Image (spheres, grey):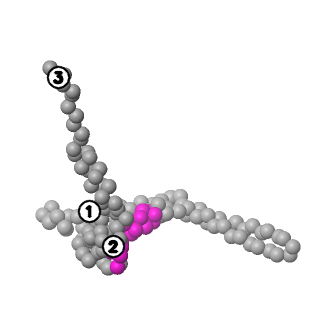
Amino acid sequence: MNMCSKCYKDMLVKQEQADLAATSIGSLVNGNVGIRPVVATAANVQAGEVEAVAVSTEPSTGSSSSKVSEEVKEITRPKRCTSCRKRVGLTGFNCKCGNTFCSTHRYSDKHDCPFDYRTAGQDAIAKANPVVKAEKLDKI
């Protein structure tokens, strides 16, 4: 086909879009034209007050894709320093407390880190150096 990788990917995307459009038009022509949205109203009468509630039910085909796109948007928001809210992008420093900081606030004393480095260090030393006790020897 003599296409570069970019042109080939673009051609595949266009074909998928054309196939999707053809199937959606076909489904509209075949069966979904007769379906109309249903509107129901309910009235609650209490001491002369009337409250009308309208409920609309429509077949929702894009609700699952919209939820996925909302989740993606939440994940891809720009990273900011937890202390000064400065944008850090790829240069952010992840602290042991679980937050991201800029170059100014990356040290634990600069951002009042709640992580206890002392006990973490003591635990690491205790695991690395187990207590060794020799067996008692019988004296002659």
Disc ID at residue 139: 3
Confirm whether residue 22 shows in the render. no
Q: Element under label 2? A: loop
Point out the tag, 3 or 2, that comes first from the N-terminus: 2
Q: Residues within 10 Å of mark 3 (few under 14, many from 20)?
A: few
Q: In the rendered image, which quarter contains the N terminus?
A: bottom left
> Where is residue 83, by image quadrant?
bottom left
* Total marks in image: 3
Q: Element under label 1? A: helix
Q: Which residue is mark 2?
A: 111
User: Compared to 95, does 127 lie above or below?
Assistant: above
Q: CA distance from mark 2 to mark 1?
A: 50 Å
The question of residue 55 being in magenta is answered with no
**Identity of the residue drawn at 50% across and 58% down:** 30
Q: For this rendering, which residue is in front, 23 or 119?
A: 119
Residue span colored magenta: 65-84
Q: Amino acid at mark 1?
A: Leu
